């Protein structure tokens, strides 16, 4: 968690996507890493970014029943009505 905070403080872009589409918030949500999810949600303007499979961070955390991370994402604007899959 502290590493994520330090990286952002020193200019790391928490919104960057790799060629498959996920942002750093996708794996932290999928793994249920609460502290990192909170830091990233606070610094990311759009917590509803889709990965290459059409999944948002909220989809990934919900599939794995990480309730606390799901609450963090919703508090920061994740839409619970967004459907999974390609647009």
Image: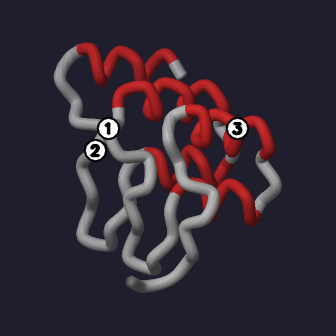
Q: Do labels 2 and 1 touch, CB within 8 Å? A: yes
Q: Do labels 3 and 2 touch, CB within 8 Å? A: no
Residue at x 38%, y 83% (from the top left corner): 87
| Residue 79, position as x, y percentages in the image | 55, 54
Residue at x 17%, y 23% (from the top left corner): 11
Which is in the foreground here, disc 2 or disc 1?
Answer: 1
State the separation of the CA atoms marked 3 and 2: 20 Å
Is residue 34 placed above or below 65 in the rendered structure?
Answer: above
| Residue 40, position as x, y percentages in the image | 44, 32
Is residue 26 placed above or below 40 in the rendered structure?
Answer: below
Q: Do labels 3 and 1 touch, CB within 8 Å? A: no
Disc 1 crowd, CA 10 A, few/some/many (<14, 14-19, 20+): few
Residue at x 68%, y 39% (from the top left corner): 69
**Circle 2 is placed at which residue position?**
15
Q: In this view, does 10 lie to the left or right of 65?
A: left
| Residue 15, position as x, y percentages in the image | 28, 44
**Circle 1 is placed at which residue position?**
45
């Amino acid at each position: 968690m502290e590493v994520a905070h330090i990286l952002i403080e020193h200019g790391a872009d928490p919104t960057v996507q790799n060629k498959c589409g996920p942002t750093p918030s996708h794996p932290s949500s999928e793994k249920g890493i609460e502290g990192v999810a909170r830091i990233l949600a606070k610094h990311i303007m759009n917590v509803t970014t889709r990965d290459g499979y059409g999944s948002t961070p909220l989809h990934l955390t919900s599939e794995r029943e990480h309730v606390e991370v799901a609450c963090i994402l919703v508090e920061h604007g994740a839409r619970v009505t967004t459907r999974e899959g390609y647009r």
